[in-house]
Image (spheres, rainbow, N blue to C red):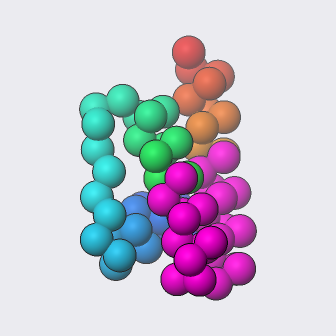
Amino acid sequence: MKTLFDVQNLLKRFGSFIYTGNRKADLELMQGEIQELFQNGMIDTDDFRQATLILRSEINKQDKLN
């Protein structure tokens, strides 16, 4: 997993499609979904860590733009 698209595809495998029209809100919702999947044992530690790093990076990019 290397891109936000990969994170979105991971979420889609579990039936989670996130689009609110607000990019930062979408990223934060994705982060919450990833956290729940990990807590429920549905994704492994490596996927959780990679997805979290990607989402944090994207959120930081959004913060710098605003």
| 1 w.r.t. 22: above or below | below
Residue stretch in magenta? 32-56
Q: Residue at x 60, y 62 (%)?
A: 35
Q: Does residue 50 appear in the picture of this structure?
A: yes
Q: Residue furthest top?
A: 66
| Relative image position of residue 24 (x, y in whole percent) | 48, 33
Q: Is residue 43 something that shows in the picture?
A: no
Left or right, 64 with reference to 4: right
Residue positioned 28% across, 32% down in the render: 21
- Residue 55: within the magenta? yes
Please tell me whether residue 12 is drawn above or below residue 58 in the rendered image.
below
| Nearer to the camera, 25 or 54 | 25
x, y percent for residue 52: 65, 59
Quadrant position of the C terminus in the picture: top right
Tell me which residue sits at (28%, 71%) in the image: 15
Quadrant holding the N terminus: bottom right
Q: Main secondary structure of the magenta part?
A: helix
Counting from the top left corner in percent of width and height, residue 57 is at 66, 45
Q: How many marks?
A: 0
User: Image check: 56 left or right of 23?
Assistant: right
> Relative to residue 9, is residue 43 depicted above or below?
below
- Residue situated in front as seen by the camera: 31 or 6: 31
Verify whether residue 50 appears in magenta: yes
Pinpoint residue 55: horizontal percent, then vertical percent.
59, 51
Residue at point 47%, 53% (across, down): 30
